[in-house]
Image: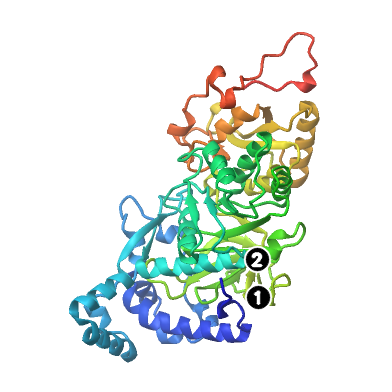
Amino acid sequence: MPKTLWDHLPAKQYLAAQEQHLVRFIREMIYPYSPYYRELLDYNRIKPGVIKTVKDLSCIPFTTKADIAPLPEDPDIPFSLVLQPTPERMKETGLSLRMKQRGMKLTRGRKGYAAAMDREFLPIHYHFTIGRTALPTPVLYTQYDLLRMGECGRRLFELLELKREDLVINAFPFAPHLAFWMTYFAAEAAGVPALHTGGGRILGTHRILDALERLKGTALTATPSYAYHLLRLAASEGRDFSSLHTLIMGGDRLPAGLKGKIQELLGKVGAEKAAVASTYGFTEGRVAWSECRPSALSKEESSGYHLFPDMEIIEIIDPDSGSRLSEGEDGELVYTSLEWRGSVLLRFRTGDLIKGGLDYSPCPFCGRSLPRLGLEITRTSEYKEFELTKLKGTLVDLNAFYPLLSGHKDVLEWQLEIRKHNDDPYDLDELYLHVAPAEGMSKRYLEKELQELLQREIEVAPTRIVFHSLPRLLHKLGLDTKGRERRFVDLRPGAAGRSMSEEEEPEPQESMDFEGIPEEEPHAEGCADDDLLDED
């Protein structure tokens, strides 16, 4: 795919163009056509003409997840974010836009004009947020938006140097979520062949492995945990993935330790030179951003996520004061849509904390002039309903468990359960850590190691560590059977996060466990406890 100007314009040039687009977008699209933001701006007595620069955005109040989430008594709140050019509102647009509309009517006729307006403004595609912190919130795309999503995907593939000769195996779970569909439209826009498997829940893990091996897939897209699961199985089965040269990880963070584990497994299946690229995205932002290929190949530093300045405006703010921060400063990411047509957002607080903030200098790996986000992101909104009160005097951030446990060389898989002591809703919170240890690892040694590690890094040790065989824990996580892994489970009485359909699913029978491996035997008399695993 040929290089385009989108990634090599000088920063001053693309920032000036971005500012012009923003001013016009607010005046000609958002204020006249967005019911939500027209009401918000009028309520705060903000005239659209006040916005003349990106810095002027600071006079507009923030939008939060709570503002746009549907409520049982008002489920239509998210639809007020969609641009709705009614005849009455179209009369309020600028002269240049009205002249453009009249020209379209004259050249295309009434039906052609109506069809063109539908392509631009009629929502035809829905995504949903997962709904961890509220009811699932729809994000709507028009045909115009889907073309933009495809262009963003094409650019992402260009960043990672994928070509038309490649074959993408899309192992993201099939769902109305960003990761699967971003891959679908990216492959379509880039003209890269792709097999969209739907993940283990749809096609099945072993069939995905067969497809990678027999079709000689060159690129794999998956969540980091599922990619690790696939490669672990592939290595144990002696599969040949020598054609695989790119892994695109999305949906969850990719800690450095887990990336190292994945790179080690790639070596075992003949793909030791494959790039492992981390991506970042959120449903409301419509697209995902990626590292460049040279950065993804690095085993040490990363250049960060390359943004698309003609598609969005990113601010980094102080999460406490809300004030805008300078380049390179740590803070919370705030997102503004630029030139989209379906669900449009102004100053949307993601709740994601970015270490290193924004960087406008050319990428040291690929030389592109795109602005970049720091790679280390704490997704404070991700498991908000699992925030504990105080456990042993300390507030616990569950996100901190990810890099410590997923990157630990002796931990194959893990799951964290939050409980109440004696199931009493007024008693203390308890953390049960479920672990599948590496083969041959001493239970006593690993238990002591994890207790000390978590106490040192998070200041809270688990109430209990329960060891499982890998097949047993894979079942608990649902990597092969659920649309999304169940990494954190809330078992507190009356907890909103508990899914009865998932929690009460029966465990596999001993004779029917994964891969036909029976569960561990009870402790035998005289056996050394060190090398045995606890039963459930």
Q: Looking at the picture, which amino acid does disc 2 mark?
A: Cys
Which element type, helix, strand or loop, lies under badge 2? loop
User: Label 2 belongs to which residue?
Assistant: 292
Of pointers 2 and 1, the one earlier in the residue sequence: 2
Rounded to the nearest angstrom, the CA distance separating label 2 from label 1 is 9 Å
The amino acid beneath tag 1 is: Arg
Quarter holding residue 164:
bottom right
Residue at 36 percent across and 59 percent down: it is: 125
Identify whether 361 is placed above or below 176: below
Give me the residue at 32% from left, 64% from top.
123
Does residue 383 lie above or below 330 as drawn? above
Q: Mark 1 points at which residue?
A: 368
Q: Where is residue 64 in the image (x, y as percent from the top left)?
A: 47, 62
Q: Identify which residue, 288 or 534, lies in the foreground.
A: 288
Q: Left or right of 367: which side holds 223?
A: left
In this orientation, which residue lies closer to the viewer: 364 or 444? Answer: 364
Query: Foreground residue, 186 or 32?
Result: 186
Q: How many labels does the image show?
A: 2
- Which quadrant: the C terminus? top right
Q: In which quarter of the image is the N terminus?
A: bottom right
Quarter of the view holding residue 296: bottom right
- Tell me: residue 188, above or below residue 210: below
Q: Where is residue 349 in the image (x, y as percent from the top left)?
A: 52, 64
Q: Which mark is residue 241?
A: none
- Relative placement, left or right, of 374 versus 410 is left
Task: Name the secondary structure under disc 1.
Answer: loop
Which of 265/513 is in front?
265
Residue found farthest to the top: 525
Q: Does the image show residue 394?
A: no
Query: Residue 258: x percent and y percent?
Result: 69, 47
Q: Do the residues labelled 2 and 1 touch (CB within 8 Å)?
A: yes
By what rule are the colours in the image chosen?
Answer: rainbow
